[in-house]
Image: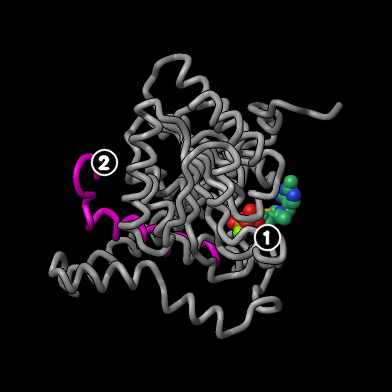
């Protein structure tokens, strides 16, 4: 998969299926009592992480959020190491001490993610400034939600990235809710992308359930960033199928009609229909792909459940702030 010419459609489907399958496994592990705390599922939003990351070059960087699994997998994370982290095992990306929301893999260009809503934007801007000063040619993507766009950090970050024309793409995943608050109760502008105007940068609304549309918009924004034209704010309209986290049933503030309306717009179903229609892949090939991914995730989960926990003696190593 590259960002020159057309993306590899089979790879795009594979990545979306991998994220879906991984998240279904995560939910099962949570329900079976193997995880220490709730986690935020990405099901329904797969096209965003997949399309955005497919538009990046290998050395480019991402900063994720409290809903990070999809972003990491799309950037090439190993499902085994990610599941190991979710289960608190020492093979995890943060050696079992970070859990779902704190995964880092510098080799893959995944900078530390944070549970602080809007907390990732300023250091994504810092990373973009570093890339510019070093002349590394890297582009940074900062993922965040609609809720985060009301944090001060969002506004300061867009302003600073704009005036310094930094190589960054702001990827806002508008899934209609910040926890249980509907976006239009918290934000009066119709489109969050409109806010780009305030900072003199480009803003664009994108159908976040259309992986090719996500890819196309991201590719253009990444190219502009790399060529020194500064940042773009992309707003991806999408929806999370499950509750805010596994601790939230998600059905007290959303109607069944709304949920089923968005399930109809499933990004995987939609892309699969397109591939079948264009005869890029046959139903048999798609079924085989799904089966292979399911086997790989089952195997990753089996290994992660057997993997050792970190030893007590290492409880304080790699921890940068310890209360005395
Ligand atoms: C600064 C801060 N405020 C509040 C919270 C609690 N919180 C966690 S996620 C969340 C909602 C975030 O909504 P959004 O940015 O739209 O992301 P989504 O969960 O929809 O992906 C809130 C309020 C937090 N983690 N950090
Ligand atoms: Mg949201």
Horizontal and vertical percent position of residue 9:
23, 57
Question: Who is closer to the viewer here, 207 or 251?
Answer: 207
Quadrant containing the C terminus is top right
Whether residue 225 appears in magenta in the rendering, the answer is: no
Which residue is drawn at the image coordinates 64% and 49% (left, top)?
Answer: 149
Whether residue 6 appears in magenta in the rendering, the answer is: yes
Secondary structure under badge 1? loop
Q: Residue furthest top?
A: 134
CA gap between label 1 and label 2 equals 35 Å
Q: Which residue is mark 2?
A: 3
When the figure is inspected, residue 31 is found, relative to residue 96, above or below; the finding is below
Secondary structure under badge 2? loop
Residue 311 in sight from this viewpoint: yes
Question: Who is closer to the viewer here, 30 or 220?
Answer: 220
When the figure is inspected, residue 20 is found, relative to residue 151, above or below; the finding is below
Question: Who is closer to the viewer here, 177 or 90?
Answer: 177
| Image side of residue 309 versus residue 48, left or right | right
Which residue is drawn at the image coordinates 69% and 44% (left, top)?
Answer: 116
When the figure is inspected, residue 152 is found, relative to residue 258, above or below; the finding is above
Which residue is drawn at the image coordinates 26% and 53% (left, top)?
Answer: 11
Q: Nearer the viewer, mark 1 or mark 2?
A: 1
Q: Which secondary structure type mostly characterizes the magenta part of the structure?
A: helix
Quadrant containing the N terminus is top left
**First reached walking from the N terminus: tag 1 or tag 2:** 2
Horizontal and vertical percent position of residue 269:
34, 73
Q: Which residue is mark 1?
A: 188
| Image side of residue 145 versus residue 52, left or right | right
Horizontal and vertical percent position of residue 220:
34, 42
- The residues colored magenta run 1-29
């Amino acid at each position: 998969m590259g960002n020159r010419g057309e993306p590899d459609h089979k790879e795009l489907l594979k990545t979306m299926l991998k994220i879906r399958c991984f998240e279904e496994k995560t939910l099962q592990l949570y329900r079976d009592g193997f995880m220490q705390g709730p986690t935020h599922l990405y099901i329904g939003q797969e096209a965003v992480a997949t399309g955005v990351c497919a538009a990046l070059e290998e050395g480019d960087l991402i900063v994720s959020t409290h809903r990070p699994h999809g972003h990491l997998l799309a950037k090439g994370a190993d499902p085994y190491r990610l599941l190991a982290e979710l289960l608190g095992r020492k093979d995890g990306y943060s050696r079992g001490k970070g859990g779902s929301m704190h995964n880092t893999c510098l080799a893959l260009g995944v900078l530390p993610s944070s549970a602080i809503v809007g907390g990732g934007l300023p250091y994504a801007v810092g990373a973009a400034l570093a890339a510019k000063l070093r002349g590394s040619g890297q582009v940074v993507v900062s993922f965040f939600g609609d809720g985060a766009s009301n944090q001060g950090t969002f506004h300061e970050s867009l302003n600073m990235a704009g005036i310094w024309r930094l190589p960054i793409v702001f990827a806002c995943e508008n899934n209609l809710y910040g926890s249980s608050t509907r976006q239009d109760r918290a934000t009066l502008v119709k489109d969050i992308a409109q806010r780009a105007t305030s900072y003199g940068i480009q803003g664009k609304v994108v159908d976040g359930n259309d992986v090719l549309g996500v890819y196309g918009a991201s590719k253009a924004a990444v190219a502009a960033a790399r060529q020194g034209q500064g940042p773009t704010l992309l707003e991806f309209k999408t929806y999370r199928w499950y509750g805010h986290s596994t601790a939230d049933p998600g059905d007290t503030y959303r109607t069944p009609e709304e949920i089923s309306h968005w399930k109809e717009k499933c990004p995987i179903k939609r892309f699969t229909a397109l591939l079948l229609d264009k005869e890029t892949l046959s139903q048999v090939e798609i079924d085989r792909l799904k089966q292979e991914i399911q086997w790989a995730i089952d195997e990753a989960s089996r290994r992660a459940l057997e993997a050792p926990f970190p030893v007590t003696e290492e409880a304080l190593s790699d921890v940068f702030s310890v209360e005395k």
